[in-house]
Image: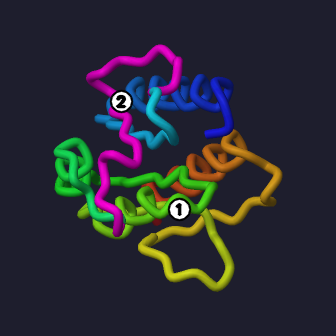
Amino acid sequence: FTGPEDFELLKKYVLYLRELKKKVKVIGYYEGKTEPAVQYSKVDYDFVNEKSFTWWGKPSDHIVTNFVEEPYDIFIDLNFKENTALRYIAFTSIAHFKIGLYKEDEETPFDMLISIPKESGLKAFLREVDTNLQKINKPAKEE
């Protein structure tokens, strides 16, 4: 995320998903030693930093290990900054369906790629995710 505004947007999106009766878990990565100064529920959100990974990028923290080993229905990757640790999580997660940002000439673990202009940001990305998921979940019309 680029700041508290993006985190507030994510919290609203999580609430929206919960209203749709979806089980949601968020794992966030922060740089440095100090966790971001944002308010969140420790039940819904976990934060990790470089200490949660070995020097070659493998998780060394139970938070990451538990997250990637949980068979979530959908995994939505919000890693817009090319963070290696978050890429590892995306590749190793055993989620059934993975959604991520389209990046040209890049190996991807995702089942669905969302393409938005780079300057569009998180709000546009989440809007596209929603639009595409609604298309997938739309019941077939009876003939």
Image quadrant where one finds the N terminus: top right
At label 2, counting other C-alpha atoms closer than 10 Å, the crowd grade (few under 14, some 14-19, many 20 or more) is few
**Residue at the image point whose x is 33% and y is 30% from the top:** 21
Mark 1 or 2 closer to N-term? 2
The image quadrant that residue 44 belongs to is top left
At label 1, counting other C-alpha atoms closer than 10 Å, the crowd grade (few under 14, some 14-19, many 20 or more) is many
State the SS at label 2: strand
* Secondary structure mainly formed by the magenta segment: loop
Residue 61 percent coordinates (x, y): 21, 47
> In the depicted view, which residue is nearer to us: 142 or 53?
53
Residue 100 percent coordinates (x, y): 53, 62
Q: Name the residue under label 2.
A: 45
Please, what is the three-letter code of the amino acid marked with disc 2?
A: Tyr
Q: Which mark's residue is nearer the viewer, 1 or 2?
A: 2
Q: Which stretch is magenta? A: 35-56
**Residue at the image point whose x is 55% and y is 54% from the top:** 79
- Structural distance between the alpha carbons of marks 1 and 2: 19 Å
- Position above or below: 111 against 118: below
Q: Name the residue under label 1.
A: 100
**Residue at the image point whose x is 67% and y is 43% from the top:** 122
Position of residue 71 in the picture relative to residue 12 (left or right): left
Residue 97 percent coordinates (x, y): 36, 63
Residue 23 percent coordinates (x, y): 29, 35
